Amino acid sequence: MNLSAAEIYQAIVVPTLIVGGVGLAFGLLLAWSSLAFAVKVDQRILQVKAVLPGVNCGACGQSGCESFAEAVVAGSAKINGCPVGGEGVARKVAQVLGQEITNTASFVARVACGGLAGCTRQKFTYEGIKSCTAASGLHNGPKACSFGCLGFGDCVAVCPFNAIVIVDGVAKIYEDNCKSCEKCVAVCPKKLIGMVPRGKNHLVNCRSTQKGPVVKRNCDTGCIGCTKCVKVCPASAISFANNLAKIDPLLCTNCGECVRACPTNTIVDVTAPVVLRKSLA
Amino acid sequence: MMANIVQQIVITLLTAILVENLVLSKFLGMCPFLGVTQKTSTAAGMGLAVTFVVVVTAGLAWILNYTLLVPNHMEYLQTMTYILIIAALVQFVETVVRKFIPPLYKALGIYLPLITTNCAVLGVPLLNTAKNYDLLMSLVYSFGAGAGFTLALILFSGVRERMDKADIPATLRGIPSALFAATLVSMSFFGFQGLFAS
């Protein structure tokens, strides 16, 4: 192909100039705008953000990791305020800000209901929306005990760490996966999930405040208010109010006396495999 | 004369919004249509951002096309220059919004830069050129296209918010059922075909 100089000019030089020129013009515009409209960001915010887990779960109470970083640098959030990152992240954040860490107790979520299928009676058959919140709106849910876990898994759906599964109709938390973000605590319509310090293994597996005979009629493993655990506890860690035993995790020594004393198997050792009933065990 | 222009503007607007809806009859911008329609609030935010970018892009594209490309007989460079305009413009808008309207910047988040790769934004200036619109009509048509895009996203996000509550077989949950719903919404928009004699 023989092209004249004019044709080469028209086919190669002009389009290159046009596209290159347009590109250059926009490039200069962007360079100017990035200088003219620059937003000053505190370098420490970026550094703090870099050491955070970055899942934007909102467990710290902020809208995401970036807002948490801003709040920490501004001093309105605690250095160890990220429950997901725990101690490791808290130490790194403290390093960035050159501050000391105060109090890093690690918590874990626990479901207080032992009403597995077969343990708790049913009031009616529920065929509505598969959600605890919806089900609890209909006569407090299909379970005879109005305090029990409904097992539709609102907590499973909300957990960002796959730490919850439904076993036999009751939510079970895998503590290794739990990052204590407390999302499940907020979503449970029965308020069954509470935060307990890690390493305290004994749990009153019931939240029913009804009287003993009523509990017994509805469920095989509810707290009937016999107060045996209160009497047997050597550390006086168990109190009794509203027909329900309560373990103070700060006083509990993990001795296991209450588990052995409980006639309905309401108090359980969460590290032990799930046992249905004493009579079945 | 004046009444004639007003009539033309109204017809162009309605055509862009209903008859030639970007998403539902031209099948442009399917990615955000399926991607950001889980919630009505984000769908509306995305729609407004796209509308803004589309209108400004169309104006700039028209000016560049008729001052640089057409006099030099370089119409084959249209796609390339339009992409340049879009990329630069989105970046510019992001910088400006970040500086002057931080709440909007936070609300739009990643959707703002993602507009760069939205084929609807490239499609509108190309359509304007193909239709030989003048500057005013280009702006009117792009505004209509953006409004139609927003309308489609908001309508569809409403449908999807309802579907979240429905008991759908496990295999069809999520995107598959969304595609079925998109088909139905799209078919309903085909009712507008032939609204105006073109």
Image (cartoon, coloured by chain):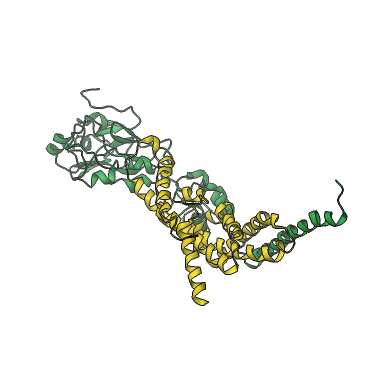
Q: Position of residue A123 (x, y in %)?
A: 16, 37
Q: Colour of chain B?
A: yellow
Report if residue A75 is visible in the image: no
Q: Tell which of A72 and A106 is nearer to you.
A: A72
Q: Residue furthest front?
A: B197
Residue drawn at the location 62% of the way across and 61% of the way down:
B89
Q: Residue furthest bottom?
A: B2
Q: Residue furthest left?
A: A213
Report if residue A280 is visible in the image: yes
- Based on the displayed image, in which of its 4 quarters is residue A231 positioned? top left
Q: Position of residue B12 (x, y in %)?
A: 50, 64
Q: Is residue B184 above or below residue A17?
A: above
Residue drawn at the location 43% of the way across and 43% of the way down:
B179
Residue drawn at the location 67% of the way across and 54% of the way down:
B80
Q: Tell which of B82 and A28 is nearer to you.
A: B82
In-image side of B85 versus A154 (left or right):
right
Question: Which chain, by letter, is green?
Answer: A
Q: Tell which of A270 and A64 is nearer to you.
A: A64
Q: Tell which of B106 and B9 is nearer to you.
A: B9
